[in-house]
Image: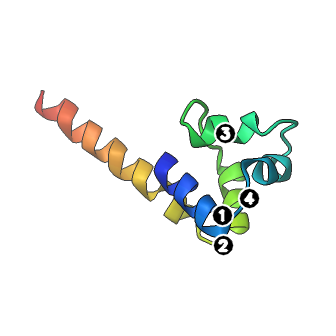
Amino acid sequence: MRVKLRQLRLQKGISQTHIAKRLGFKYASGYSNIEMGRNRLSLDHAAIIAEILGCKVDELLEDEVSHQEKLHKKNKTA
C-alpha cells in the first residue's frame, strides 16, 4: 500500500501537506507516517485519500490485502 499511495500521489502532483490537511492533520508528518507504513490507514482516511487521488478505496488497499494473504499462507506452512 505504501508504494501505491506514494506512486498515485506523485502521479497526480499532490503534496503530502495537501493530503495531510484534508485528513485533518496539523503537520504533513501525519500523512507521511501513513505513507511510510508507520501508522495504519483507517477506512475513513482511505476514503478521503481515494477521493483526492481519484481512485477507489480497494485500489489503495489491494497491495496490503495481497501482502497479508501471503503472510497468512507463509505462517500456515511454517
| Element on which disc 2 rests | loop
Task: Say what amino acid the circle numbered 1 marks.
Answer: Ala
Q: Look at discs 3 and 2 and give the one toward the viewer.
A: 3
Q: Which residue is mark 3?
A: 32
| Residue that numbered label 4 is attached to | 48
**Foreground: 45 or 16?**
16
The answer to whether any part of residue 17 appears in the image is: yes
The three-letter code of the residue at mark 3 reads: Ser
Place residue 70 in its image quadrant.
top left
- In depth, the one of 68 and 38 nearer the eye is 38
- Pointer 3 and pointer 2: residues touching (CB < 8 Å)? no
Which comes before the other along the chain, label 1 or label 3? Answer: 3
Which SS class for mark 3?
helix
Earlier-in-chain disc, 3 versus 2: 3
| Camera-side residue of 44 and 18 | 18
Q: Which residue is mark 1?
A: 50
Coordinates of residue 42 in the picture (x, y in percent): 65, 44
Contact flag, marks 2 and 1 (Cβ < 8 Å): yes
Which tag is nearer the camera, tag 3 or tag 4?
3
Q: Are marks 1 and 4 in contact (CB under 8 Å)?
A: yes
Amino acid identity at mark 4: Ile
